[in-house]
Amino acid sequence: MSELQEILSGDGYAAPPKRILEGLASAETGEALTHRKPVGAPHSIYEELWHVVFWQQITLDWIAGIETPYPKSSLDGFPTVLDMEKEPIGALCERFFAGLNAADEVANDNSRHDREIRCTSRPGQPVRTMTVLEQIENLAAHNAYHLGRIVLLRQLLGVWPPRSGGDSW
């Protein structure tokens, strides 16, 4: 596994995503917990994960040559109430890991890394061009940031570390 893959799906920077999301879809933790916002938190665990999946899919689209539009507002990158009602946390986790596996495949395919891709920008900004490798690195950084926020939310909600263990810091 390359260092980039370690950062995406392993434990290259902190707890791996499987551990960070462990138990969130179980009856023990329950749907309600993932939708709770601790005092002062702008988003719930569900909303943070949905946001990760949203951007992960846009990244994969751009790599595939699909110029998915950049959201018009930051609110567009987070779920609506209807989005949250339609997709239980277990299904959202499955969608996250499916996208993560696809990103891992791209990270592992060095022959694609130097290929330039078009990445749409904020409204009014020119389209950016970057390499596949740069976009996957961007995704890895974005995922790490939001997965760290999920750990903090789990800590605030009293469900960290998960049963399999993990650092409590």
Image (cartoon, helix red, strand yellow):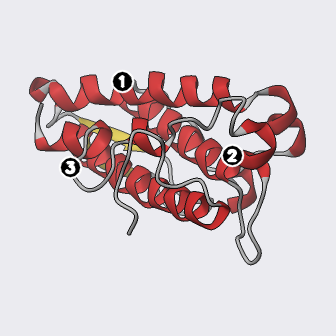
- Asked whether, in this view, residue 102 is left or right of residue 121, the answer is left
Q: How crowded is the residue under tag 2: few (<14 C-alpha within 10 Å), some, or many (20+)?
A: many
Task: Please say if the residues under marks 2 and 1 sit with CB atoms less than 8 Å apart.
Answer: no
Mark earlier in primary sequence (2, 1): 2
Q: What residue appears at the point 36 percent right and 23 percent down from the top-left corner? A: 102
- Asked whether, in this view, residue 101 is left or right of residue 41, the answer is left
What type is the residue that disc 3 sits on?
A: Gly
Residue 79: image location, x then y, percent? 76, 45
Residue 50: image location, x then y, percent? 64, 42
Q: How many marks?
A: 3
Residue underneath mark 3: 12
- Image quadrant holding the N terminus, namely top left
Residue 100: image location, x then y, percent? 40, 30
Tell which of 158 and 57 is nearer to you.
Answer: 158
Check disc 3 and report its element: helix, strand or loop: loop
Mark earlier in primary sequence (3, 2): 3
Mark earlier in primary sequence (1, 3): 3
Separation of marks 3 and 2 at Cα, in angstroms: 24 Å
Residue 83 shows up from this direction = yes
Check disc 1 and report its element: helix, strand or loop: helix
What type is the residue that disc 1 sits on?
A: Asn
Check disc 2 and report its element: helix, strand or loop: helix
Task: Please say if the residues under marks 3 and 2 sit with CB atoms less than 8 Å apart.
Answer: no
What type is the residue that disc 2 sits on?
A: Tyr
Residue underneath mark 2: 46
Tell which of 159 and 50 is nearer to you.
Answer: 159
Q: What residue appears at the point 24 percent right and 48 percent down from the top-left corner? A: 134
Residue 73 shows up from this direction = no
- Asked whether, in this view, residue 85 is left or right of residue 46, the answer is right
Residue underneath mark 1: 101
Separation of marks 1 and 3 at Cα, in angstroms: 16 Å
Q: How crowded is the residue under tag 1: few (<14 C-alpha within 10 Å), some, or many (20+)?
A: some
